[in-house]
Image: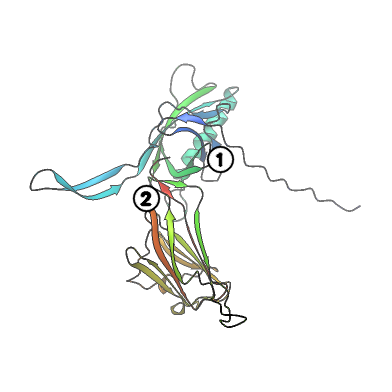
Amino acid sequence: MPLIAAPVITPPEPPAPPPVEIPEIGYASITYIDPTGVRWPMTDLSADWYTLAEGVSGLGAAPYTLTSDPHPRGGARLRHVQPQPRTIVWPVLVKGADHMVFTRNWRDLGRAFSRTLRSRPGAAGTPGTLEVARPDGTARRIAVYYSDGWDGRGQRATGITWDSAVLTLWCEDPYWVDVQPVTVHRQQGSGEDFLQPYPSVSSSQVLGATTVMNPGDVDVWPTWLITGPASAITFTREDTGESFTLDMAATAHGPLLTGETVTISTDPPRVRSGTGENLVAGLNWPAAVLWSLPPGETPVTFQLDGSGPSSAVDLTFNPRYETA
């Protein structure tokens, strides 16, 4: 009798917790995602743990340090503005049907936050993510590290079937990031004979100018994906004149063939082929400026030398915001 393989069932992603009114941001559904990818709903009041709205802080505008110079006629003049790491205060209630269920929940949730400090190769720790979703389906995230606060209240009746903690979460990047990326795609049109069957002009979206819209509050550093064929790639920000060129002919890889790809990350600077080759030496250093996109519209120009009908450019970024 032939064996019949049982189907593999992938557990569905848990539904988003219901919205709860949180100081500074209003009604929202909030989820904590630990470094292993496990999602912990923070605003489901029917769960064994949830955020205590009273006492939440640090979800508003990013903190800044202002550097100024004295002015001879009095006062001062602003010289530099530096965004600072953000600190979020996050009160959490944990409970259980009995003492052992409560103890398990307390330990598991505490581990989910504190494991952000565990080392990984080349880094001090792996951040978790705090995700704030709105009733309209939009959501923003911020990377967080546990700082302190996972300690009980130390009062009578706590620590048996319930207790609360007031966490301090540290964010190296103070800005909130949209979970949905913005992508701009440009592809070379197929060539046409100018006189056959009648006078015509081919489309060429890659070799030309376009306008990129950043809907966020602060600058973003985009990632570029180039699909060959191409021998050299130049990207120019027209409002400032900043540009960078990747000369594929100057790399060990050589020109991109049809279907081959290369990815350029602007922060941190990184250039990788589709097979993982490091091609950063192909950038036109020291003149290369891996420019950012400010809020609003920015005129940019894509130029691919040696392009063909399948050549394409994909610019991708996640908008960044001051508040959740």
239 left or right of 201? left
Q: Quadrant of residue 199?
A: bottom right
Residue at disc 1, secondary structure: strand
**Residue 56 x/y as whole percent:** 41, 31
Q: Would you call the spot at circle 2 few (<14 residues within 10 Å), some (14-19), or many (20 or more)?
A: some
- Of residues 43 and 301, the one nearer the viewer is 301
- Of residues 249 and 190, the one nearer the viewer is 190
- Of residues 11 and 236, the one nearer the viewer is 236
**Residue 221 x/y as whole percent:** 41, 57
At 29% from the left and 44% from the top, the residue drawn is 64
**Residue 18 x/y as whole percent:** 56, 32
The amino acid on which the numbered mark 2 sits, given as a three-letter code, is: Val
**Residue 176 x/y as whole percent:** 42, 45
State the mark number for residue 153: none
Residue that mark 2 sits on: 218
Q: Earlier in the sequence, mark 2 or mark 1?
A: 1
The amino acid on which the numbered mark 1 sits, given as a three-letter code, is: Arg
At 50% from the left and 79% from the top, the residue drawn is 306
- Of residues 21 and 265, the one nearer the viewer is 21
Query: In the figure, 71 relative to 306: above or below?
Result: above
- Cβ atoms under marks 2 and 1 closer than 8 Å: no
At 34% from the left and 44% from the top, the residue drawn is 85
Q: How many marks?
A: 2
119 left or right of 62? right
Outermost residue, bottom side: 195
Q: Would you call the spot at circle 1 few (<14 residues within 10 Å), some (14-19), or many (20 or more)?
A: some
Residue that mark 1 sits on: 39
The CA distance from mark 2 to mark 1 is 28 Å
Residue at disc 2, secondary structure: loop
Task: Work out which quarter of the rendered image holds the C terminus and state it.
Answer: top left
Which is in the foreground here, disc 2 or disc 1?
2
